[in-house]
Amino acid sequence: MLYWLIPLLILLGAALFAADYFFKFAVVRAKPPKKKKKSMSASKGLVSLDEYKEAMAAGEAWIKAQNPETVHITSHDGLKLAGHYIDAGRKRTLILVHGYRSRAYRDFSCVAEYYHSLGFNLLLIDQRAHGESEGKYITFGIKERFDCVRWAEYIDQRVGGEIFLDGISMGAGTVLMASAEKLPGSVHGILADCGFTSPGEIMLKVMETDLKIRCRPLFWIVAQIIRLRAGFGVYEFSTPEAMKVNRLPVFFLHGTDDKFVPCRMTEEAHAACTAEKTLLLIEGAGHGTSYLKEPERCKEALRGFLEKYSREG
């Protein structure tokens, strides 16, 4: 008599299984892989980095050759977070915030030496649930923004002087969202490369465009699982919301051929920004490759922004 319930229960079970899979795929910290697995950051829409492999390897080698000091702070919710500090002997510091399932050593490999040559101390942090930092869940900037504030407070107390926050991809989301919080007065500006608007928007984009799963009810289930297990809402906060209250100068950078985080997301955050702002779009650059594609143009723009808002000079 209730046979009609069987296909319904099967459908519901399949939906819950798929939602749980996407939750783990997107949010749960990756275990050290025995072999390389595909992740959200390895979507087929991403540009290949093969042509930049040598430059990135040389950049990582330079970072390691500086023998960075490993430093730690405690997050607002009790996680031990790690960072790697390179001194330049100046009272000016760049806090470098990496992207999704990556490391600052990699994401800033080709620009770290240049930043250091400009006289900036470098703090390459491991975001929660990445690298040497504790944490089980990646929250796409929602909780990471408070970690960023703690790192800024650490540098303010240790070095003083001037601080700039620099993030790429998810790291850009972190630093932009952090601007809405109570940062130390020593923070002078923000640099944001190819950031997304909100966790929900980028997750939905990946699910529908990259994974070809076009099912909004399924995403609603995913969002509920994320809220219950990881403790954040995917639309809880966004970079445009942060930009409406931010008072720090912001340098926005994005490649026009970014297939992972659409360029329009940076343009939306830029449009919402009520503070002083700069927007640089690099034609033909893919996700996170603007600096790699046009290094001299990016160097000039980055140096101009940092010099404009740095009194230490």
Image (spheres, rainbow, N blue to C red):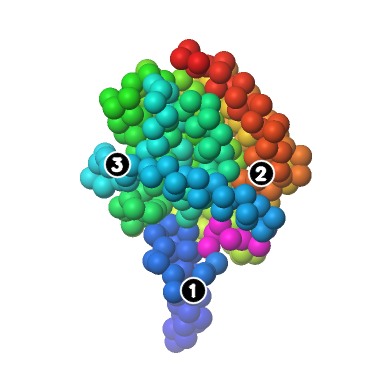
Badge 2 local density, few (<14 within 10 Å), some, or many (20+)? some
Amino acid bearing label 1? Lys
Q: Name which quarter of the figure residue 308 lies in.
A: top right
Q: In this view, does 107 lie to the left or right of 284?
A: left
Q: In this view, does 71 lie above or below 220?
A: above
Disc 1 designates what residue?
35
Q: x%, y% of residue 29?
A: 39, 59
Q: x%, y% of residue 182?
A: 35, 24
Please state which of residues 108 and 116 is positioned toward the viewer in this rendering: 116
Disc 2 designates what residue?
292
Please state which of residues 146 and 65 is positioned toward the viewer in this rendering: 65
Amino acid bearing label 3? Val
In magenta stretch: residue 42: yes
Q: Give the range drawn in magenta.
A: 39-45
Residue 50 visible in this rendered orientation of the protein? yes
Element type at marker 2? helix
Amino acid bearing label 2? Leu
Disc 3 designates what residue?
71
Q: x%, y% of residue 104?
A: 47, 46
Please state which of residues 206 and 145 is positioned toward the viewer in this rendering: 145
Q: Name which quarter of the figure residue 77 lies in.
A: top left
The numbered mark, 3 or 1, whose residue comes first in the sequence reads 1
Looking at the image, the residue that sits furthest to the left is 78
Report how far apart the C-alphas of labels 1 and 2 lie in the structure: 27 Å
